[in-house]
Image (cartoon, rainbow, N blue to C red):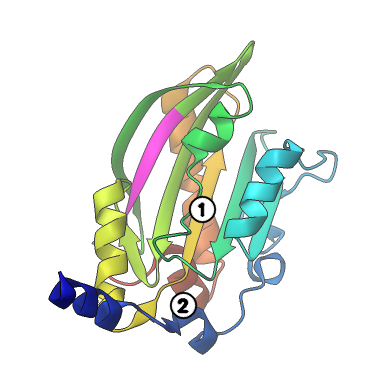
Amino acid sequence: MILASILAMWMKPTQMLSTHNENVNLEAMIPRQFKDWKVDESIAPQLISPDTQTALNEIYNETLSRTYINEQGERIMLSIAYGGNQSDNLSVHLPEGCYGGQGFTVSDRINGVLPTNFGNIPVSRLIANKELRNEPITYWIVIGDKPTSIDQWDMKKAKLMYALKGKIPDGILVRVSSISPDAGHAYGLQRDFAESMLEALSPEQRKRLIGWGVQ
């Protein structure tokens, strides 16, 4: 027991990876217009409950929420959240919990990949439904610079790899969604939107959003 206690203390990370990275400014990083997409100024950011906002403030240093529209009048909601401390005590707040806490029914959750010109990004897809609103959602998570599949073990493994180096990683969650009764069409539109957004970023900015080493 004593040896285990000493080992736990020795392995406890103390170096924040975020202190060695350039400060994240999501508002400046993500263009307001790219390819066929531009911010829809007629749509106000969606408000969330005060208790959910308090919980998010404890986890994230930066958040961004926008609605984009293309020339065909199709809309995509983009939400990005960055947290500088992804220790065991703090972790990204998954959309399942966020939507469920606001009265949505969450269903049809599957893990998969989002194919892009920059590699295949591991993602999770799900549908949030509330009354007449049907919202297919695609999201992904990057821990440090490592894209992770959306399960607790994979995220813990990524954190452990940094902990072995004495480091506490930062993390980012990217969520794109659209209101549509046709999930297949919505997921295709979200893929096109995500790829257009990534193409508009610099290589270093893309690293922030998708990490290194996507397959």
Q: Return the x and y of residue 28 as percentages of the image width and height.
A: 70, 71
- The local secondary structure at tag 1 comes to strand
Q: Residue 144: name its quadrant.
A: bottom left
- Number of residues whose C-alpha sits closer than 10 Å to that of mark 2, classed few (under 14), some (14–19) or many (20 or more): few
Q: How many marks?
A: 2
Q: Is residue 71 magenta?
A: no
The answer to whether residue 9 is left or right of residue 143 is left
Residue 185's x, y, as percent?
46, 27
Q: Is residue 30 above or below residue 18?
A: above
Q: Nearer the viewer, mark 2 or mark 1?
A: 1
**Quadrant where the N terminus lies?**
bottom left
Residue 111 point in image, percent of width and height: 29, 39
Of residue 50 and residue 175, the one placed in the foreground of this image is 50
Where residue 128 appears, as percent x and y from the top left, is: 52, 24
Judged left or right of residue 24, residue 92 is left
Three-letter amino acid code of the residue under disc 2: Pro
- Could you tell me which residue is drawn at 25 percent across and 54 percent down? 154
* Secondary structure beneath label 2: helix
- Circle 2 sits on which residue? 203
Q: Where is 13 relative to 74, above or below?
A: below
Q: Which residue is more in the foreground, 129 or 164?
A: 164
Q: Which residues are magenta?
A: 121-126
Farthest residue in the front direction?
A: 2
| Gap between marks 2 and 1 measured at Cα | 17 Å
Residue ID for mark 1? 174
Residue positioned 33% across, 72% down in the render: 212
Point 71% across, 65% down: residue: 27
Q: Would you identify the image quadrant in which residue 178 lies?
A: top right
Give the amino acid at mark 1: Val
Residue at x 69%, y 49% (from the top left corner):
54
Specify whether residue 161 is in view: yes
